[in-house]
Image (cartoon, grey):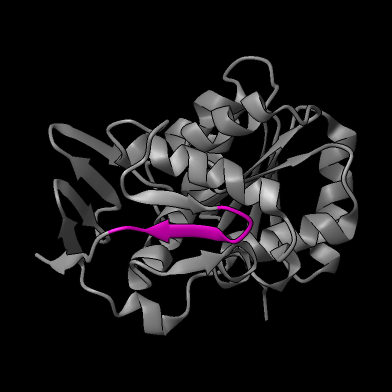
């Protein structure tokens, strides 16, 4: 039984060959593309569950391709980059990526990231109301949007899972480890810097003033808290 369908998008043939061999050996169905334009065509034909997308490619770059692919809410996207700067991580997340991984990476790390990107929040949390509001903030879990006053923003699948988990535990301090393991899985318990980037990007979408957040606040040395009691709408 297939573990899922993965589309590898990279302009380097050797990278595509290595990743195809690695992922096929791990039980995934694999196809590949060498450009962003080709990736969009392959997605229509192959219908992948996840896309591994290089950030630096000729023609349509990885960021532009990511934005185009994100029109399909069911595809998980992991951006590949040779750099590990925070600016690149934020740029990837802003484009709609669920995750990012810097080259060179190990096979166990790649497979762990893929499992985490394909993972969904437990069913008990998925039973939460489809649309909730707190103050001027409205969260629509079905359309994956957040509205705060006149501003509306779309959430990536992982941003949605993270916000859902926090709102389910409103007014509680939720630890870094709990958030990471609940939303991404057991391999992510210690990656506090990773979580910080996701929280920063999520604040940019739900807060009027991200630098002085009202809804998602930091609990020093512990984790994060969602303030207010979301009510079904």
- The location of residue 132, given as percent across then percent down, is 18, 62
Q: Is residue 150 left or right of residue 152?
A: left
Q: Residue at x 49, y 55 (%)?
A: 158
Residue 31, above or below 165: above
The residue positioned farthest toward the front in the image shown: 220
Q: Quadrant of the N terminus?
A: bottom right
- The location of residue 2, given as percent across then percent down, is 67, 74
Does residue 198 show up magenta in the picture?
no
Which of the two residues, 219 or 113, is positioned nearer the viewer here? 219
Residue 35, above or below 93: above
Q: Residue at x 40, y 40 (%)?
A: 203
- The location of residue 195, given as percent across then percent down, is 61, 51
Q: Quadrant of the C terminus?
A: bottom left
Which of the two residues, 225 or 177, is positioned nearer the viewer here? 225
The reply to whether residue 171 is in sight is yes
Q: Is residue 30 left or right of residue 175?
A: right
Q: Residue at x 32, y 50 (%)?
A: 215
The residue positioned farthest toward the top in the image shown: 59
Q: Is residue 228 left or right of residue 173?
A: left
Q: Which residues are magenta?
A: 220-227
The residue positioned farthest toward the bottom in the image shown: 124
The quadrant holding residue 230 is bottom left
Q: Is residue 172 left or right of residue 75?
A: left
Residue 68, above or below 147: above
């Amino acid at each position: 039984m297939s573990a899922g369908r993965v589309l590898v998008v990279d302009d380097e043939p050797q990278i595509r060959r290595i990743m195809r061999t690695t992922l096929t050996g791990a039980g995934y169905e694999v196809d590949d593309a060498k450009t962003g334009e080709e990736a969009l065509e392959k997605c229509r034909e192959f219908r992948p569950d996840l896309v591994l997308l290089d950030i630096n490619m000729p023609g349509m770059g990885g960021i532009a391709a990511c934005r185009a692919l994100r029109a399909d809410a069911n595809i998980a996207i992991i951006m590949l980059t040779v750099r590990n700067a925070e600016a690149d991580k934020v740029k990837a997340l802003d484009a709609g990526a669920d995750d990012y991984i810097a080259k060179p990476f190990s096979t166990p790390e790649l497979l762990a990231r893929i499992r985490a990107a394909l993972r969904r929040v437990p069913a008990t949390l998925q039973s939460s109301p489809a649309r909730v509001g707190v103050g001027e903030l409205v969260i629509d879990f079905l359309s994956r949007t957040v509205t705060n006053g006149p501003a509306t923003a779309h959430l990536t699948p992982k941003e949605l899972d993270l916000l859902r988990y926090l709102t389910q535990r409103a007014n509680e301090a939720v630890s870094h480890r709990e958030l990471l393991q609940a939303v991404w899985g057991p391999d992510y318990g210690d990656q506090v810097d990773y979580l910080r980037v996701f929280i920063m990007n999520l604040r940019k979408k739900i807060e009027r003033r991200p630098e002085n957040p009202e809804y998602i606040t930091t609990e020093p040395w512990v984790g994060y808290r969602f303030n207010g009691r979301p009510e079904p709408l």
